[in-house]
Amino acid sequence: MKTAIFDMDGTLIDTEKIYQKYWNISAKELGYDLTEKDMLLFRSLGHSFAVKLAEQLTGSAEAYDEIRNRRKELMDPVMKEIELQVKPTAVEALTFLKENGVRLGVATATRLDRTEEYLERAGLREYFDELISARSVAQGKPAPDVYLYACSRMNVSPSDAFAIEDAPNGVKAADAAGCKVIMIPDITEPDEEDWKHIVKRADNLLEAAEYIIQA
């Protein structure tokens, strides 16, 4: 039986742009000289990696946690109120995969209770057999831990699993685990480095689903 493991933010639900907005607002508010391009490097980045990157960019070991805490203060009330938008063709793609017997999982940097909440609110929870948060493993993306754990939970060899991601850190994590990686660009297109880690670039989730069924 085929297995497909999805990132959530920016891949299934159109939340990554909201995150980026508030990351940028928070960094500027706290006086950190970080560009929007700098902030894109933090997409799906595990905490230990993010702390080190922020220190490299700012010179402060406290920068990442300060920015993250302020981002949460600003963004969390907004996220409770808005209607969560699914990415284009999400329902069609997930329905198509389930009808063809594909097991579906989620591997996300978001904590598990929030993952459950967001997928329920977006109307997508029913499609997934397993939800895996990087908070449950030693290291977040781009380390392979979350994908290795997801494959273990789903009783599948990573080489037999497809991973669907939108951002470089997730792409690297899935490839490092040994999964076959499909990238659906959200904010940025794959660069030369990303292409080394993916088997397919898809325009949307339905295109990715069709590739999985035909593979």
Image (cartoon, rainbow, N blue to C red):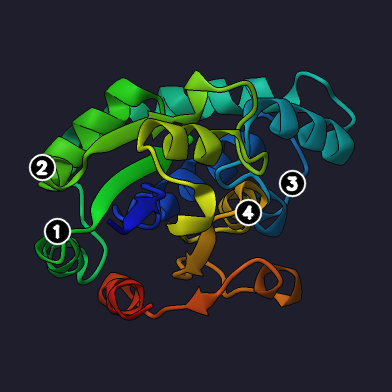
Residue under numbered circle 2: 126
> What is the C-alpha distance between the residues marked 2 and 3?
39 Å
Q: Using the rendered view, name the quadrant where residue 207 is placed.
A: bottom left
Residue under numbered circle 4: 40
Foreground mark, 4 or 1, reads: 1
Q: Which amino acid does label 2 sit on?
A: Glu
Residue 66 percent coordinates (x, y) = 65, 21
Q: For mark 2, does the 10 Å Cα neighbourhood hold few (<14), some (14 to 19), or many (20 or more) residues?
A: few
Residue under numbered circle 1: 98
Secondary structure beneath disc 3?
loop
Residue 116 percent coordinates (x, y) = 23, 30
Answer whether labels 4 and 3 touch (C-beta < 8 Å): no
Residue under numbered circle 3: 34
First-in-chain label (4 vs 3): 3
Answer whether labels 4 and 2 touch (C-beta < 8 Å): no
Residue at position x 35%, y 78% in the image: 211
Residue 69 percent coordinates (x, y) = 54, 20
First-in-chain label (2 vs 3): 3
Q: Using the rendered view, name the quadrant where residue 55 is placed.
A: top right
Q: For mark 4, does the 10 Å Cα neighbourhood hold few (<14), some (14 to 19), or many (20 or more) residues?
A: some
Foreground mark, 1 or 2, reads: 1
> What is the C-alpha distance between the residues marked 4 and 1?
32 Å
Foreground mark, 2 or 3, reads: 2
Answer whether labels 1 and 2 touch (C-beta < 8 Å): no
Q: What residue type is labelled 1?
A: Lys
Q: For mark 3, does the 10 Å Cα neighbourhood hold few (<14), some (14 to 19), or many (20 or more) residues?
A: some
> What is the C-alpha distance between the residues marked 1 and 3?
42 Å
